[in-house]
Image: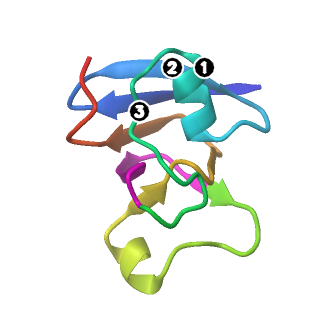
Amino acid sequence: MSYLVTIAPAQLSFAVQEGETILEAALRSGIDFPNRCRQGVCTSCVCKLKSGEVRYNVPQPLTELDKQQQFTYCCLAYPNTDLVLHHPFIRG
């Protein structure tokens, strides 16, 4: 099973396969997606969740503030549904 992820405002879309993080799928699809540490520390891959639902492996990396802000750590997040994410620095 795969889910469709769309990055706004660039309107780039790509499929995420089962067991693949959002970041892994974006890079596999040739998208210039900001990333550095791939451990949820540097925050360069963080997007705002506009629609859909993601999950994380334990330990779950989000603070309460992250959850309130709808932040998604794409290096650690797996989609549960199709998603629309916002990242201002990703270009089409």
Q: Are marks 3 and 1 in contact (CB under 8 Å)?
A: no
User: Circle 3 is placed at which residue position?
Assistant: 33
Disc 2, SS: strand
Residue at 24 percent across and 24 percent down: it is 91
Q: Residues within 10 Å of mark 2 (few under 14, many from 20)?
A: some
- Along the viewing direction, whichever of 70 and 59 lies nearer the viewer: 59
Real-space Cα distance between discs 3 and 1?
10 Å
Real-space Cα distance between discs 1 and 2?
9 Å
Q: Position of residue 78 (x, y in %)?
A: 65, 47
Quadrant location of residue 10? top left
Image quadrant containing the N terminus: top right
Residue type for callout 2: Phe
Colouring style? rainbow
Disc 1, SS: helix
Magenta region: which residues? 43-54
Disc 3, SS: loop
Q: Residues within 10 Å of mark 1 (few under 14, many from 20)?
A: few
The label on residue 28 is 1
Dot 1 or dot 2: first in sequence order is 2
Residue at 54 percent across and 25 percent down: it is 27
Position of residue 8 in the picture relative to residue 76 (left or right): left
Q: Position of residue 12 (x, y in %)?
A: 35, 20
User: Circle 2 is placed at which residue position?
Assistant: 14
Residue at 22 percent across and 38 percent down: it is 89
Give the answer, above or below, for where 9 lies relative to 29: below
Give the answer, above or below, for where 36 lies relative to 40: above
